[in-house]
Amino acid sequence: MTVDAIQEFDPMESLLSDDPSFGLPFPAVEPWIHLLTGMIDLVVIAILSIGAARFLYWIVRGEISSGSGDLRLERQNLARLELARYILAGLELLIVADVIRTAISFRLEGLIFLGGLVLIRSAISWFLDREIANIERKRQHDAPR
């Protein structure tokens, strides 16, 4: 690279460039990072699938074996709490994968997209955290003393 090329380098032009080859400074690492983010996505799918299966199990079990409405409602709330925890774990891992993906693309569009995703997923996480806290508070309040 010549001195003129270095002086003419515009980082914003690189960020906005349509050049798909612009990525990590170490191209040999890029396929491994794609593999890593793909594996994280698969782990998230497994986590969400396990959470959904456990949720369905407890809902069906609660409907079949609960005689009173209070016991059935308690089991439904426990199932919802457990599902919410699985969803939160999945969301947190998806944010990690998105940050890694953005790091390898190093494009302004990717950063804007990541910001939007993190904002949406953080809002969902915040609402789920509030829901979990409300259900747990209600369970503690309604628990026999």
Image (spheres, rainbow, N blue to C red):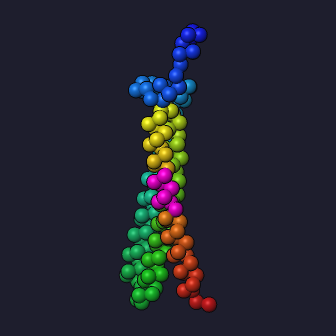
Point out residue 8 in the picture as x, y percentages from the top left corner.
53, 16
Main secondary-structure element of the magenta-colored stretch: helix
- In percent of width and height, residue 6 lies at 57, 15
Image vertical order of residue 145 relative to residue 47, above or below? below
Location of the C terminus (image quadrant): bottom right
Can you say whether 70 is above or below 19 in the image? below
Q: Residue furthest right?
A: 145
Residue lying at 49% horizontally and 50% vertically, measured from the top left: 118
- 95 w.r.t. 77: above or below: above
Q: Nearer the viewer, residue 80 or 6?
A: 6
Give the residue at x 53% y 80%: 138
Magenta stretch holds residue 120: yes
Residue drawn at point x = 55 percent, y = 72 percent: 133
Above or below, 10 relative to 92: above
Residue 47 visible? The answer is no
Residue closest to the eye, 47 or 102: 102
Q: Which image quarter: residue 54?
A: bottom left
* Residue range corresponding to the magenta coloring: 119-126
> 116 or 121: which is nearer to us?
116
Q: From this viewpoint, is residue 24 visible?
A: yes
What is the x, y in percent for residue 41? 46, 47
Corner quadrant of residue 62:
bottom left
- Residue at screen point 54% across, 12% down: 5
Which quadrant, please, contains the N terminus? top right
Total marks shown come to 0
Where residue 109 appears, x then y in whole percent?
A: 44, 36
**Magenta segment includes 99:** no
